[in-house]
Image (cartoon, grey):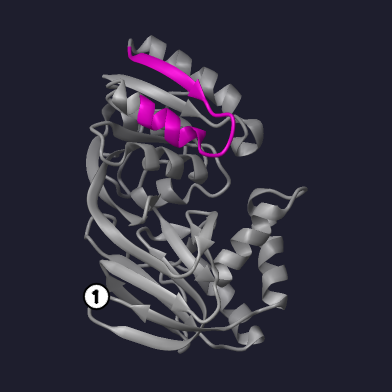
Amino acid sequence: MDCKIIVNPVAGRGKTAALAHQVRDALAKRGVKFDFAVTKGPGDATNLARSAAEQGWQIVVSLGGDGTVSEVINGLVGTNSALGIISCGTGNDIARSLGVPTDPGQALNTILAGGRRKIDVGVENDQVFANIAGVGFSSDVTSQANAMQRLKGSLAFLAATYKTLANLKTMQTRIELDDEIIETKVINVTISNMKYAGGGMVFAPDAVVDDGLFDISIAREIGRASFALTFPQMYRDVGVIHPAYSRYRSSTVKIFTEQPSEKMFDGNINGRTPLEAKILPKAIEVLVPCNVGANTRFAPTLAG
C-alpha cells in the first residue's frame, strides 16, 4: 500500500499542520510508503490529486474539509486511485454521509484497514460534484458566505443564511427530470448525491451514494416566516416535511430559470443557469469502514 496525502493547511482553522505531523508519524510506524503535498489555493487539490493518480499512487488522501475532498474527487474521477478521507473541516458532510469516521485516528485506520466502495458523482460539463448542487436560496447563501472576510465556516454560513432570508427570492423555474417536467415558482432546488450538506443539514434523507440516482429537493414558493420555521427541520434525520417541499429521484436534472441564477457545486459558485447535471455511476472508489454501525469499533491511531 502507498498513500499520497494532500493537505489543505488552512482547513480546520489551521489545525491540519499539527494533524499532518501525527499522520506522518503513524504511517512511518506502520511502514507505509507515503508522501505529502500541500495546497496553496483553490483548485490545487484537484491538480495534485490528478498528478498523484498519473504517478500511480494507489491511495490519494484528502486531509482537509469538504472543499478539499471535493477537489480531490474532481482529480481522481476516471483514474485507478482510491480516495481516503481524513476530515479536518467545519462541516465534514462528505465523510459523515459515507460513514467515514470524523475522528482523525479512526479515519486513518479506515484508510489502512477498511473496505472499499465505489460511489457515484454528479457532473455538469467539466464540473464534478460529489455531494450537492443547488440553485436559488442555497447558492445565494453560499455566495454570501464565501464573500465574508471576517467570518468563516459555520458562523459565516449562519450569518449568510439570515442575510439571504431577509431578501428571500422566488424564481419561475422549469425542472426536467428523467420522466417528469416541473414548472413552478421555487425558492430553492438542490440536487443531492449524499445525505448531509451545509454542516450536518439533511437535504436528502434517502440518498444512496451508489444507486445511480440524484435526490432532488424542491422548495416551492413559501412565506419568509414559514420558510424560516422549516430550518430546524433540516437537522432532523428525516429532513424537512412541509407541503411546500417535494422530493424526486432522477439520473439527470435540467434546471432553467427566467433570470440567470448562480449555480452552487459542493459549496462553490460556478456559473449561472441553466444547470444540466447527470450522474456518473460508481465513478470513484472510496475507502470506508468494513462495517459501519452501532457496534463498529476502531482502535485509536493518533494522539490527541
Q: Is residue 91 left or right of residue 250?
A: right
Q: According to the image, label 1 marks what residue?
A: 178
The stretch drawn in magenta includes residue 44: yes
Q: Which residues are magenta?
A: 32-51
Residue 154 place in picture, x, y as percent: 64, 53
Q: Quadrant of the C terminus?
A: top right
Q: Which of 278/23 is in front?
A: 278
Q: How many marks?
A: 1
Q: Judge by depth and name the residue closer to the eye, 117 or 101.
A: 117
Name the residue at 62% across, 64% down: 141
Q: Residue furthest right?
A: 150
Query: Which of the 4 quarters of the picture holds residue 286?
Result: top left
Considering depth in this image, is 156 or 146 the residue closer to the camera? 146
Question: Please, what is the three-letter code of the amino acid marked with disc 1?
Answer: Asp
The image quarter containing residue 157 is: bottom right
Q: Is residue 205 visible?
A: yes
Residue beneath the point at 27% across and 83% down: 180
Q: Can see residue 208?
A: no
Give the x, y percent position of residue 126.
Answer: 38, 50
The location of residue 297, given as percent across then percent down, is 33, 37
Q: Is residue 95 above or below residue 194?
A: above
Residue 245 is drawn in which quadrant? Answer: bottom left
In the picture, the quarter occupied by the N terminus is top left
Residue at left offset 36%, top offset 55%: 125
Q: Residues within 10 Å of mark 1 (few under 14, many from 20)?
A: few
At 37% from the left edge and 26% from the top edge, which residue is drawn? 51
Tell me: 302 left or right of 169.
Answer: left
Instruction: Between residue 252 and residue 91, name the one nearer to us.
Output: 252
Residue 43 image position (x, y, % from top left): 51, 38
